[in-house]
Amino acid sequence: MITFVALSPSVDVTYLVDEFTEGGTFRPTTVLRVAGGKALNAARAARVAGASVRAVAILGGTSGDFIGQQLAVAGVPLEAVDAVAETRTCVSIASAASGLLTELYEHPSAISTVELAELRRLLGHSAEAGWWAISGGMPSSFPVGELAGLVRLGHSLGQRVAIDTHGAALATALDAGPDLVKVNRREAAELLGTDADADAFDLAHRIRSVTGGRVVITDGAKGSMAVDGSSRWLASWSGAIGRFPVGSGDSYLGGLLAGLDRGDSFEDALRLGSGAATANALVPGAGVFTVEDATRIASEVVVAAG
């Protein structure tokens, strides 16, 4: 069982347009709306990959109601904290003419101390041991150090904990010893105060020296680098990369955890994560892909010792 903890959910809207330039008026050829934010995208991806999942999310207003309905359709069980603030909306605009993607992301909705206490109560009822996945940017109202507290809470309940976030929340959570840290190259460099061109394996080992757990750094079309103890791997794929990368990092996490949760080797889980991320980019919509595409691509992913 994988529990996805959504502290910053959103309604993710993707507009496909023939062309897009600043200051113009355009009518989308296609509009997609999904239950989004990194944690819910990852939950949907893990569900597609065959994992048993649930989502614990802080949701408010009509946007929150929409997310609940969409998760039900996707087969993702939801335990929701009723929030005062309306859940945010994030917009992506994909231009066919330029191939470029424009993204407009609202800041995460505020969380009250009452809502946070209810989130902890719901998480405390986790009966089945497995994984907790806490991902996404943290609201400005989220207390410094609280992410570390959630990691420790998970460990106290016999859960393995994965985190995928950035900034101060990530920095303060490392000492709590998350079992898996999954970040992109930019986030890793920011965390360690170094140049983004630094060696990714070095970045991963430096993070692992604090957490003691596995670390995965994704780097777009260049693949992903992972470390576990003294071992390190580079996962790469030589096929074509799709036009819709929004949610690919989340799909990677969902696929990776789906593999680990069912007992795959770390190398095979890296393949499944890479397959899910790449399949996600083939079609519009974050965390939207077919298991057939994901498994086909995963079978072609090369995982080599770094």
Image (cartoon, rainbow, N blue to C red):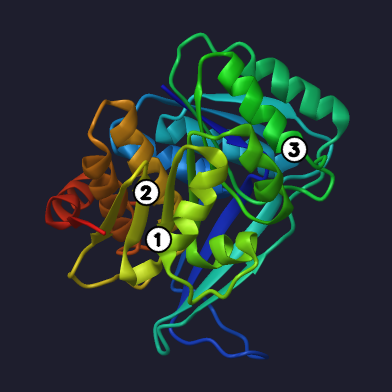
Amino acid type, callout 1: Phe
> Is residue 59 at least partly visible in the picture?
no
> From the viewer's perspective, is residue 138 above or below residue 184?
above
Residues at badges 3 and 1 in contact (C-beta under 8 Å)?
no
Badge 3 crowding class, 10 Å Cα cut-off, few under 14, some 14 to 19, many 20 or more, is many
Query: Label 1 near label 2: C-beta < 8 Å?
Result: yes
Q: Position of residue 158 (x, y in %)?
A: 51, 15
For the point 41% across and 29% down, the residue is: 75
Q: Position of residue 297 (x, y in %)?
A: 18, 55
Residue type beneath disc 3: Gly
Q: What's the CA distance linking mark 3 and mark 2? A: 38 Å
Report the Cα–Cα distance between label 2 and label 1: 7 Å
Question: Which label belongs to residue 60?
Answer: 3
Q: Which residue is mark 1?
A: 201
Residue 252 shows up from this direction: yes
Taking depth in this image into account, of 41 and 182 the one nearest to the observer is 182
Which mark lies nearer to you, 3 or 2? 2
Residue under label 2, please give it: 227
Whole-number angstrom distance, CA of label 3 to CA of label 1: 40 Å
